[in-house]
Each structure stands twice: as C-alpha cells, then as structure tokens.
Image: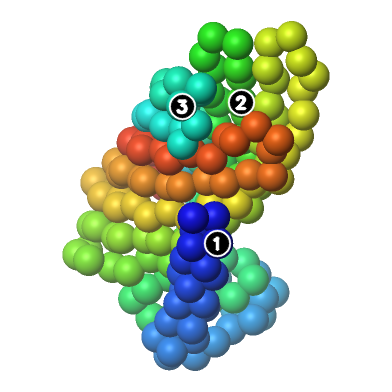
Amino acid sequence: MKLLKKGLLGVIAGTMITGSLNAADKFVPLPIFNDSTYKTNIEVALVGGMMNFSEDDVDSNVVYGVEVSLDCPVFTLPGDNLLRQQFSVNRYSDTGIDITTIEVNPYYFITLTDDMVLGFGPGIGGALVDIEGGDSTWNFTYQAGAGIKYYVDKFLIGVDARWQGSNAEENLDNTRFMAKVGYRF
C-alpha cells in the first residue's frame, strides 16, 4: 500500500510539472527577478478540520492552523492556470499526543470560473510529534492534496483534502479534510 501511495504521489508531481510546461504560453524562470509583471499575490488563511489517522490507536480529532500562499517565485505560467506555493503550520492535539506540522505544498491551480479555482499538488514538510511520557521528535513528512477556493473580492473560502505520510516510528499516516477562510493582499 505504501508503494502505491508513493507511486501515486510521483504521478501527481509528474503530471503537475508536465502539465505546467505544456499549458504555459511561455516559461519564465525566476520571475521574481526576470519578469517585471510578477506579483506575489499573497494570501493568508485560517484553516481547520479533521485529521483521520490510518492507525487505529490514534484518534481522529480537530486540526487547525494557518496557511500563507503566493504565486510561485521559481517559475511562472502566464496562462489562465497558475502555480502557487502554500506554506502551512497545523496543530493536532488529543489525549497523549500533540503534533505540529510545517509544510510546503506547491499547488497547480486550474481556473474553473472567474472566482473559483481547483488546485492539486504534492508537498514536503516536518512534524514535531510529542507523545506523553516520551521524547519529542521531528519527522520528515510528504503529502498529496487537492482543494477548491472561491473568491469574493479579496476574501476567500475553500476546502482541502490531503493525505500525509511520514518516516515516524509510529504510523502517523493521516488524511485531513479542512476548510479555510482567508484574505488576498
């Protein structure tokens, strides 16, 4: 099953990169330095939802956090579709276990309407796991997710679904379903 999930993550990443190159009118490397029209379009959102673990010993519970995203400064896609970098910090706490995740998730967004986008992509990060009676440990994480965002003027609302795996000794693989509310600067 882990091999299948890792393979799926690779297919999603390959599709995102290949689709980005094929969909672009032109490819601009390092637009933050090479494109005078580049704008970061920073968004800040509060996120919250449920974290469901694949391990039965860990209870599903509320997860909450903050997400900051911006148009990709590494390369741009000048057409209707766009690549954004999403940085998030999330917190999960239940009896005997606290988990804080820090993640970077590049999402490829497809414009559905003038006010709605569908995004998907892979990600990497770290999870600080604090188990009661044990040591706190940092673990490498990897994830794949998808979401929809709807804009009303500068405000946004959205939903995300994300699968996350880790190299933790304990099986902390999880699926998260989260809503978000934010503002685009």
- Give the alpha-carbon distance from disc 3 to disc 1, as whole Å: 21 Å
Q: Earlier in the sequence, mark 2 or mark 1?
A: 1
Q: Position of residue 143 (x, y in %)?
A: 54, 52
Marks 3 and 2 in Cβ contact (< 8 Å) = no
Residue drawn at (80%, 19%) of the image? 135
Up-down relation of residue 104 to residue 30 (above or below): above
Type of amino acid at the residue the image marks with label 3 = Asp
Up-down relation of residue 38 to residue 70 (above or below): below
Marks 3 and 1 in Cβ contact (< 8 Å) = no
Which numbered circle lies on residue 3?
Answer: 1
Which numbered circle lies on residue 56?
Answer: 3
Which numbered circle lies on residue 35?
Answer: none
Type of amino acid at the residue the image marks with label 2 = Ile
Q: Which residue is mark 2?
A: 99
Give the quarter of the image for residue 128.
Answer: top right
Give the quarter of the image for residue 22.
Answer: bottom left
Residue drawn at (59%, 75%) of the image? 75
Q: Earlier in the sequence, mark 3 or mark 1?
A: 1
Q: Earlier in the sequence, mark 3 or mark 2?
A: 3
Q: Position of residue 144 (x, y in %)?
A: 48, 55
Nearest the viewer among 27 and 14 is: 14
Q: Position of residue 25 (x, y in %)?
A: 43, 90
SS at circle 3? loop
